[in-house]
Amino acid sequence: MNKKSIFLLNTLFFLLSLLSFEVVYLYKTKSLDGNSLAIKREFVTTLLLPDLAISTEASYIRHRSLSDFSSIYRDDASLREYFASTYVYKANDAK
Amino acid sequence: MQNKINFYIVEYAINSLLRQKYKTIFISIVFSMLVFLLSSLFFITNSIKYELKQTLEALPDITVQKIKGGRHYDIDVSTIDEILDIHGVSGAVARVWGYYYFENAGVNFSLVGIDEYEEQYKKSFVDVAANLDFTKPSMIVGEGVKIVMDKNYYKDYFNFIKPDGTLKRVDIAATFKAQSELESNDVIVMSKENVREIFDISAQKATDIVVRVANFNEVATVASKIKLLYPDTRVITKDDLKISYQNIFDYKSGIFLALFSVSLFTFFIIIYDRVSGLSSEQKREIGILKAVGWRVDDVLKEKFYEGFIVSIFSYLVGITLSFAFVYIFKAPLLQNIFLGYSQLKTSFNLPFVFDMQTLALIFFLSVPIYIAAIIIPSWRSATLEADEVIR
């Protein structure tokens, strides 16, 4: 093996180790542990509002089971709706 | 040892790549970016789906809502007694909750009423029930709500405007734990009496009724019985909700699909460029190699190593960057696909999910295709006679 091959193998090995290290680090620090999972479940069990608050203005995303007072077209079991086009806001609300 | 790696060919492949330094670097960058983009999108959806799935089982089996004139309407609390008489029903609770639109900030708060004495709540939400003072109006708010209220100078209390125009002052008792932020960001919990007062719901009415069924096989039957008993209601089972989540993810993934197809299209253009023919220089190289005694499989092996080195390098770089981008830097820009123009933004802490399937999917979508794009045209040239190729 010449210098270039060794350099290539080292680079690939370095990348692989970096990836493995990153995965282990993320697994240790960023994955859902039993405690936070229990807190989430407890929260959902109590409020019975399951959805994630990632888009809080869009009621259809936030709480799938709630009928919205400003729309009559959502009362079907599949609850399909397209936010912005079926939700009413004053123009100056969307700052 | 036929299958042993021939390091001389590997060295030749490396030299060949280095001879076309700028081309190799350019392809590696584009390839890494493609893997990075695809994997980032997949990682974000995976994490959100995972988080949702973890809490989905905690949902009520059946939700009963009254519909009047095609709209949701408050349901009679006395309905509970008749629902409880149905065989198989293990419990039913009247929920009092709704949205409160705070005009100054342009956000919707979710107001949820809990009852200190209700067995179900007391058991599962000890912390909140303990913190909440039921003797005076107080509430527990999500972190997003707290930030919005702080910005509007409501540090210790908030004035809710009741339907009759009068104000209702409620003290902020505490905020929710950070771990449940993705669920609780817009939530305000207070006693049922306070929620009733703010929304002007009488004591005989509730927003909806949630029903627990002991045996999950009986959910559909119980749901149809409730529907027969109360034709004016909408009966939603847990499965309906699961389907609707699927729908919303399909909708969101539509945006993903658009990005995905653009990047895939770019990649295929590169591949098409490769497959459509080798440059005359590359052809001559293959011809010379054959003339000096290389066999077809040696040439193909060399080309395979070339493709493999570039693609595996780019794959590893792309995946490593994307893990860091999504889970360490919280996916700036890309997370906006989910947040929309939401003003109650969460900090978007995605739980780390190591999904082999996704990694394999991205691997098989990129690496073998690229290697094939290198090998196929080389094979075409390598099978010709040496003098024919050189000429």
Image: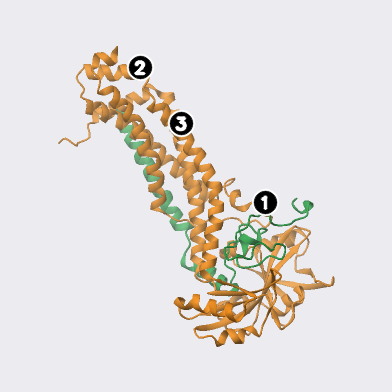
Chain colours: A green, B orange
Q: Which residue is mark 1?
A: B341
Cα separation, mark 1 vs mark 3, equals 34 Å
Q: Could you tell me the amino acid type at mark 1?
A: Tyr
Kindly state the secondary structure of the residue where label 3 is placed.
Answer: helix
Kindly state the secondary structure of the residue where label 1 is placed.
Answer: loop
Give me the chain letter of mark 1: B
Name the residue at the left extreme.
B1
The residue located at (54%, 66%) in the rendering is B241
Residue B192, placed above or below residue B376: below
Q: Which mark is residue B269?
A: 3
The answer to whether B164 appears left or right of B267 in the picture is right
Q: Which residue is mark 2?
A: B281
Nearest the camera: A78 or B288? A78
Kindly state the secondary structure of the residue where label 2 is placed.
Answer: helix
Comparing labels 3 and 2, the label whose residue is closer to the camera: 3
User: Quadrant location of the N terminus of chain B?
Assistant: top left
Q: Could you tell me the amino acid type at mark 3?
A: Ile
Residue B180 percent across, percent down from the top left: 57, 65
Question: Which of the 4 quarters of the picture holds residue B111?
Answer: bottom right
Nearest the camera: B231 or B288? B231
Cα separation, mark 3 vs mark 2, equals 21 Å
Which sits earlier in the primary sequence, circle 1 or circle 3? 3
Give me the chain letter of mark 3: B
